[in-house]
Amino acid sequence: MIQNTFREQRRKLTINASTLILTIGDITKQTTDTIVNAANSRLAGGGGVDGAIHRAGGAEIMRECRKIGGCPTGNAVITTAGALKAKYVIHTVGPRYYQGTDKEAELLKSAYLESLKLASKKNLTSIAFPAISTGAYGYPLHEAARIALQTTIDYLKGHQDVHLVKFVLYDQGTYEIFAEELKKLQ
């Protein structure tokens, strides 16, 4: 008999009164106050995380996105979460990766930072992020992980309103890269 013995992999870092966690999983199943959607600028749904969140959350999310109309790269907007377990969805638009310019790095940093600020503004104390811009937008994983983690750590050092930040990573390879980058930052 073959027995599947999946052991959840997690890395955890405490910063002031906040906790940062890396885990492998499905962002649509998270019970945090809000999950973050790696959206396109039209907020029109799509593939990857964006499509998964819209499918799992149902039509209510798309209706709210249509009312908002769009979101510039590096910014964030919020909707309810429809049928998801989270209360809200923060939609942020990361940059497409072309040549690794400073502008792309700043826009990716801004996508994470604006999401954290919006969660704080709405009094949401727990947030779950995917690896923004690393799928169809082509951002290299090591660089994207470093930017995501450094931005989050810097934010948590200066703010105590968000108590839990989870990076919910789709697969083992992405998790290992984030874990490697987190170790470098400790």
Image (cartoon, rainbow, N blue to C red):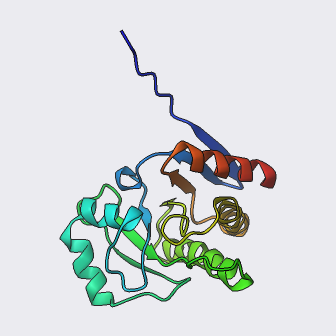
Q: Position of residue 171 (x, y in %)?
A: 50, 46
Residue 186 visible here: no
**Closer to the camera, 135 or 151?**
135
**Closer to the camera, 153 or 16?**
153
Instruction: Relative to 31, say whether 90 is above or below.
Output: below
Residue 102 visible here: yes
For the N terminus, which image quadrant?
A: top left
Instruction: Relative to 98, say whether 143 is above or below.
Output: above
Residue in view at x 52 percent, y 51 percent: 169
Residue in view at x 49 percent, y 89 percent: 72
Q: Position of residue 160 (x, y in %)?
A: 64, 64
- 145 vs 1, left or right, is right
From this viewpoint, which residue is outermost toward the front? 99
Q: Quadrant of residue 44?
A: bottom left
Q: Position of residue 27 (x, y in %)?
A: 41, 54
From this viewpoint, which residue is outermost toward the left? 59
Instruction: Relative to 89, say whether 170 is above or below.
Output: above
Residue in view at x 73 percent, y 53 percent: 181
Q: Position of residue 20 (x, y in %)?
A: 62, 52
**Closer to the camera, 141 or 165?**
141
